[in-house]
Image (cartoon, rainbow, N blue to C red):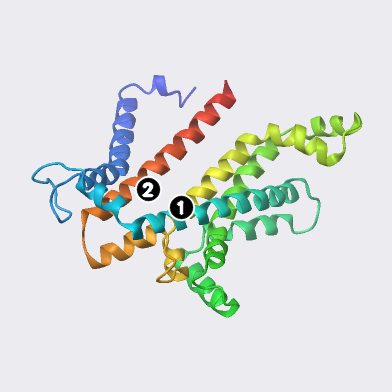
């Protein structure tokens, strides 16, 4: 084959080198912030005089940090459940529905992925103010759903497209109701897509900061918003420790998704 990697000769090492450089460029900021969280300096200075876990101790001793984590987790769990359910229904309609404008509906659902987040934030801010839910838990969930739902639609739609619907039809012909066939045949077959939708929905909500800044109130702040407001006041390494915890949770969830997909292939 013309593009066979093994036949590229010396060029393949050039491509490998470019790949390594890109990987290091992407990972280096993450490694740097983790190292800063273990530095002894009161400021975000590198290299530090010595290493310590003091900032993690201060983090877990601060009720405001723990409260913001609890708020983020509550919002992310609710968004994950709603986004996965709504994404499943939307994907079923888009993939199996036969109605005019189906492509337009799909494009409309994916629009938040291509619009600047700050534009969405301003629009949602005005809308939630009008509805009287700005600064509330409901307002945060509604805002994060805008970001999370497109991921669910994409992940579940891709699984449904590759699923052979004749298997579900055979279950109905054998006496199962359409809902029971969906529950026992279709959902197990597309569970990798549903799991991916849940993981990406959770991460989209957990990491979101721009929308959350517009939707938060002094008494209701998510974890990323708490990091942002802290850094505006003081470049304390506690913020680096908090960021490292976000990185850790995100990494764990991505590994879970990877292992789930790997197990599915075996």
Mark with earlier residue (2, 1): 1
Where is residue 204? Give x, y as percent: 49, 52
Q: Is residue 164 left or right of residue 107?
A: right
Q: Quadrant of residue 190?
A: top right
Which residue is drawn at the image coordinates 30% and 23% (left, top)? 10
- The quadrant the C terminus occupies is top right
Residue 224, above or below 244? below
Q: Quadrant of residue 232?
A: bottom left
Q: Is residue 187 left or right of residue 262?
A: right
Badge 1: few (under 14), some or many (20 or more) residues near its Cα, within 10 Å?
many
Q: Secondary structure at mark 1?
A: helix
Q: Is residue 120 left or right of residue 13?
A: right
Where is residue 248? Give x, y as percent: 36, 41
Where is residue 58? Give x, y as percent: 25, 52
Q: Quadrant of residue 159?
A: top right
- The front one of 242 and 157 is 242
- The front one of 54 and 117 is 54
Q: Secondary structure at mark 2?
A: helix
Q: CA distance from mark 2 to mark 1?
A: 8 Å
Residue under circle 1? 206
Which mark, by number, is residue 108?
none
Residue under circle 2? 246
Residue 235, above or below 126? above
Q: Are discs 2 and 1 less than 8 Å apart at CB?
A: yes
Which residue is drawn at the image coordinates 51% and 35% (left, top)? 257
């Amino acid at each position: 084959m013309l593009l066979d990697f093994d036949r590229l000769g010396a060029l393949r090492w050039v491509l490998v080198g470019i790949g390594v450089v890109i990987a290091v460029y992407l990972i280096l900021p993450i490694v740097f912030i983790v190292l800063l969280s273990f530095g002894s300096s009161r400021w975000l200075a590198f290299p530090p005089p010595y290493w310590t876990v003091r900032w993690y101790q201060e983090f877990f001793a601060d009720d405001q940090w723990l409260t913001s984590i609890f708020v983020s987790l509550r919002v992310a769990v609710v968004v994950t459940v709603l986004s996965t359910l709504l994404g499943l229904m939307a994907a079923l309609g888009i993939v199996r529905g036969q109605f005019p404008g189906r492509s337009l509906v799909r494009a409309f659902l994916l629009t938040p992925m291509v619009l600047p987040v700050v534009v969405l934030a301003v629009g949602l801010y005005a809308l939630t103010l009008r509805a009287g839910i700005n600064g509330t838990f409901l307002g945060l969930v509604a805002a994060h759903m805008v970001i999370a739902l497109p991921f669910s639609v994409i992940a579940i739609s891709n699984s449904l497209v590759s699923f052979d619907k004749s298997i579900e039809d055979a279950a109905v012909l054998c006496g199962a109701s359409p809902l029971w066939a969906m529950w026992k045949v279709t959902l197990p077959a597309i569970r990798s897509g549903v799991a991916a939708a849940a993981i990406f929905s959770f991460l989209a909500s957990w990491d979101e900061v721009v929308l959350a800044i517009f939707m938060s109130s002094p008494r209701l702040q998510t974890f990323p918003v708490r990091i942002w407001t802290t850094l505006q006041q003081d470049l304390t390494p506690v913020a680096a420790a908090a960021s490292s915890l976000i990185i850790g949770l995100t990494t764990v969830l991505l590994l879970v998704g990877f292992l789930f997909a790997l197990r599915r292939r075996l």
